[in-house]
Image (cartoon, grey):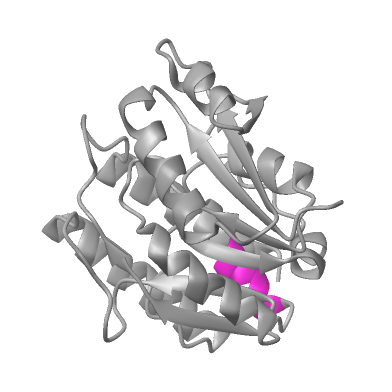
């Protein structure tokens, strides 16, 4: 039987988070036919062995976050597919609203830290300013109404994934999703999401470098118009 829900989790050295994350997911979705796909960047710790013991399917990709996410999305068999970070910044109980968005007829459901009910414990000033700038640029160019651009907690219908044809290998992947969803007139719903501070270790996001990657993704989309 094909799974109803597939959850894609890119990982790199997340052994101290995986048990807690997967227990949380399974606790919330205990009544769902669930597929967990961990796309690992060749971790040097026990990320893979822990995830496998807890029932996750393991794929490998060490190119970048976007490349890992695309590999997982393409391999997923579920009717609804969800992208989720491994650092415990995404709350498992919000899976229910992401699933409900797709089940109610939307093609893509995006968590937003800037809607009422959302927020973040892990957004330095430079990230907040950068995100708002990227949102403003995309909304202006594509006449969209996004409130958040660089947040990876999202759900997709099977049909939407086929149409998006994602290619961004790095941290521009969420921006590519947002832009292509608008260009293809997909039905998009933003829902409030609260980003918790990363549990254990330091964030892998590099604000300046990844900001340039996101800007490059936006410019590339403009040239493709």
Residue 142 within the magenta-colored segment of the rendering: no
Q: Which residue sits furthest right?
A: 1
Q: Which residue sits furthest top?
A: 44
Does residue 222 appear anywhere in the picture? no
42 versus 210 height, above or below:
above
Based on the displayed image, in which of its 4 quarters is residue 101 positioned?
bottom right
Q: Position of residue 176 (x, y in %)?
A: 58, 60
Which of 9/30 is in front? 30
Residue occupying the point 70% across, 53% down: 166
Q: Position of residue 57 (x, y in %)?
A: 67, 31
Q: Position of residue 194 (x, y in %)?
A: 28, 67
Which of 168/212 is in front? 168
Q: Which residue sits furthest front?
A: 31
Which of 9/149 is in front? 9
Based on the displayed image, in which of its 4 quarters is residue 177 positioned?
bottom right
Magenta span covers which residues? 177-183
> How many labels were placed on the picture?
0
Q: Main secondary structure of the magenta part?
A: helix
Q: Position of residue 216 (x, y in %)?
A: 49, 52
Does residue 67 appear anywhere in the picture? yes
Q: Is residue 83 left or right of residue 120?
A: right
Q: Quadrant of the C terminus?
A: bottom right
Residue occupying the point 61% across, 47% down: 168
151 versus 76 height, above or below:
below
Residue occupying the point 60% across, 43% down: 69
206 versus 215 height, above or below:
above
């Amino acid at each position: 039987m094909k799974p109803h829900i597939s959850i894609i989790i890119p990982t790199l050295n997340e052994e101290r988070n995986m048990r807690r994350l997967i227990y949380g997911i399974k606790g919330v979705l205990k009544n769902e036919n669930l597929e967990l796909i961990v796309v690992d960047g060749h971790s040097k710790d026990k990320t893979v062995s822990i995830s496998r013991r807890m029932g996750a399917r393991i794929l490998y990709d060490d190119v970048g976050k976007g490349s890992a996410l695309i590999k997982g999305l393409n391999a997923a068999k579920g009717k609804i597919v969800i992208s989720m970070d491994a650092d415990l910044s995404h709350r498992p109980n919000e899976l229910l609203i992401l699933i409900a968005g797709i089940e109610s007829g939307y093609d893509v459901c995006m968590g937003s830290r800037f809607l009422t009910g959302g927020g973040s414990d892990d957004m330095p000033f430079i990230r907040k300013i950068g995100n708002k700038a990227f949102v403003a640029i995309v909304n202006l160019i594509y006449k969209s109404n996004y409130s958040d651009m660089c947040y990876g907690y999202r759900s997709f219908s099977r049909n939407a994934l086929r149409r998006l044809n994602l290619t961004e290998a790095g941290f521009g992947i969420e921006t590519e999703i947002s832009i292509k969803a608008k260009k293809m007139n997909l039905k998009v719903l933003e829902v409030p999401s609260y980003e918790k501070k990363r549990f254990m270790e330091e964030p892998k996001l590099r604000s300046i470098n990844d900001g340039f990657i996101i800007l490059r993704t936006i410019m590339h989309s403009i040239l493709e118009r």
